[in-house]
Amino acid sequence: MLRVAVVGGGPSGSCAAEILAKANIKTWIFERKLDNAKPCGGAIPLCMVEEFDLPESIIDRKVRNMKMISPSNREVDIRLDNVYSKDDKSEYIGMLRREVMDAFMRNRAAELGANLVNGLVTKIETGTNREGPYTLTYSDYSAGEATGEMKTLEVDIIIGADGANSRVAKAMDAGDYNYAVAFQERIKLPPEEMKYYEDLAEMYVGSDVSPDFYGWVFPKYDHVAVGTGTMRKNQSLIKDLQEGVRDRAMKRLVHGEVIKIEAHQIPEHPRPRRVVGRMALVGDAAGYVTKSSGEGIYFAAKSGRMCAEQIVESSKRGQTIPTEGDLKKYLKKWDRKYGATYTVLSILQFIFYRSDAAREAFVAMCDDMDVQRLTFDSYLYKKVVAMNPWQQIKLTLLTIDAIARGLVRPPSSSYKPVPSAVRSDEEVNKMLAIKGITGGIKVGNKKPSTASKS
């Protein structure tokens, strides 16, 4: 019988293990930190809820309103009531905590028959020409000991779902990729501020919050996730950039209390090799995070499922051992389905995140209803939306305008906090005079914003 090891218990690994277990293929899924959460905005598209049979109980917030905030603090409201229907509230962006979602998906795979191992894989012997059989050496922490018990396991196939620093990728010599650094603080807010974020998410753009990405304030069940990301070349600036997000949103995060700090690497493009021998990469390990939006959860889960489905098909439900060529069929299907999406988003990031003037134009574009509908149709449902000729012409003109602005207009020289959405400026300034956000990063590495910047 075919034996498969899935290294990593996030969405990609859990979805792979679930498909394999349903086919009665002997499967082990390894995860060291069963209560850990990857620092992540935690936004998922609507189609993922149905496609992966996610219960509403794991979704903290159903966001139907977004604010795009430009370097000059122009705020563009994107309301699903306007994009779709005011009466039908079925469309939403799901906001969740990764530790809740990951645990649900991982435990479901175990309930279906996958062997869930609370363990850390430390060594992989790949056999002749990396074709297996593969011997995994791992520390088993299921007994609760701090050091773990050293064990080994022999398998026929390995699925690497172990993130940006994938040990499986190293074992298969998958090649390196460029990556971004994500930093996030979870912040509890006073009731009035928390109610404001009940079904609203904010995205901030500007060189102060990220030179090549964006900052976010996303709502969770009793707090907001506040974070930013940037490419590896700027990683030394990540805390200053996080401070930039806090400065811009300070009047909406007034008297916030940081309850958790998170940081992680996220890939910026697929690895040069994603299948070697009978080892395959999925999720972050493969490099499946989109540029511009930074979306990775859906694509992680989808890649894990597609890889496992190929293994089930090629092995005749576990009766034979698939070849490298069989596993590479998963890559062909993946690239055919999503390759264009990654290319388009990479181009958009290059155009709109190159300067603050271009970012201003980008936010202005988001005020257009056709742009909003095209964006949400493609994001919520992961489908290619056909544009009529007028939409194509308008989008082209808006893009040319953004490029022109980015080339000829000088960058912003100052960034100010956005005003409070629930208090008067006088009231919020008095509150800030008492204290700002408590806990979290040590601020003051750069010139701080002050409450007087209205």
Image: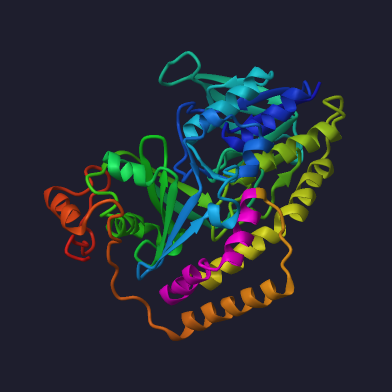
Residue at left offset 61%, top offset 66%: 370
Q: Nearer the viewer, residue 162 or 401?
A: 401
Residue 20: percent from the left, percent from the top?
Answer: 74, 27
Report the side of 119 relative to 203 (left or right): right
Quarter of the image for the C terminus: give it.
Answer: bottom left
Report the side of 155 relative to 214 (left or right): right
Secondary structure mainly formed by the magenta segment: helix
Report the side of 308 relative to 94 (left or right): right
> With respect to residue 16, does 146 lie above or below?
above
Q: Nearer the viewer, residue 422 or 3?
A: 422
Quarter of the image for the N terminus: give it.
Answer: top right
Residue 371 lies in the magenta-colored region: yes
Residue 173 lies in the magenta-colored region: no
Residue 219: percent from the left, percent from the top?
Answer: 41, 43
Q: How many marks?
A: 0
The colour mode here is rainbow
Q: Which residues, given as a range, are shown in magenta?
A: 354-380
Q: Nearer the viewer, residue 203 or 365?
A: 365
Q: Is residue 281 visible?
A: no
> With respect to residue 404, does 435 lie above or below?
above
> With respect to residue 67, does 145 lie above or below?
above
In the orientation shown, which residue stands out farthest toward the top? Answer: 143
Residue 139: percent from the left, percent from the top?
Answer: 52, 23
Report the side of 154 relative to 197 (left or right): right
Residue at left offset 61%, top offset 62%: 345
In the orientation shown, which residue stands out farthest toward the bottom? Answer: 408
Residue 275: percent from the left, percent from the top?
Answer: 73, 45
Q: Nearer the viewer, residue 174 or 130?
A: 174
Residue 388 occupies quadrant = bottom right
Q: Is residue 399 visible?
A: yes
Residue 409 occupies quadrant = bottom left
